[in-house]
Amino acid sequence: MYLLSFTNKKELIKMDLNTLIWSIIGALVVAGLGFGASKYYMKRRINIKGSQIQNGDNNEAVLKSKNVNLNKRGEDVAKKDAENKK
């Protein structure tokens, strides 16, 4: 109502349509970036060679031959984690 007192209805409707169009474009861009990032993250996470068991507690994949830590905390930490699990 406050805007109506300073602008006529035609300008108000045009401004709302413009805002709507730009907000839709912005939402599509943000959704695209989010999807691309999650797709990249999942691709990086899934492409680990060997059979894997994923543990959600500390986000690491345990392979048959060796332990690979997805957080890249270092091999020493991954070895300690593997020893603690035994």
Image (cartoon, rainbow, N blue to C red):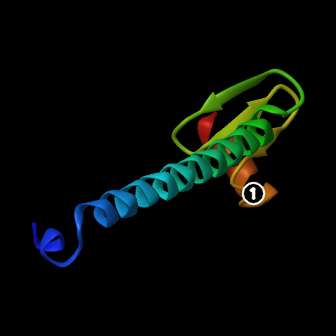
Q: Is residue 83 visible?
A: no
Is 43 rendered above or below residue 4?
above
Circle 1 — which element? loop
Tell which of 32 and 68 is nearer to you.
32
Residue 67 x, y percent position in the rendering: 79, 40
Q: Is residue 37 visible?
A: yes
Residue 3: quadrant of the picture: bottom left
- Tell me what residue is drawn at x 65 percent, y 30 percent: 54
In the image, farthest residue toward the top: 51
For the C terminus, the quadrant is top right
Horizontally, residue 57 falls left or right of residue 69, namely: left
Above or below: residue 73 compared with residue 82? below
Q: Residue at x 69, y 51 (%)?
A: 80
Residue found at x 49% / y 52%: 21
Amino acid type at image mark 1: Lys
Residue in front for this viewpoint, 66 or 7: 7
Q: Quadrant of the N terminus?
A: bottom left
Q: Is 8 positioned to the left or the right of 67 in the image?
A: left
Instruction: Give the residue pinned by disc 1.
Output: 72
User: As rendered, which of 11 and 22 lies closer to the eye?
Assistant: 11
**Position of residue 34 measured from the top left corner of the image (x, y, whole percent):** 61, 48
Residue 52 place in picture, x, y as percent: 76, 25
Frontmost residue, 85 versus 40 = 40
Q: Measuring 71% from the left and 35% from the top, which residue is drawn there?
A: 61
| Number of dots carrying numbers | 1
At label 1, counting other C-alpha atoms closer than 10 Å, the crowd grade (few under 14, some 14-19, many 20 or more) is: few
- Give the image location of residue 76, x and y in percent: 77, 58
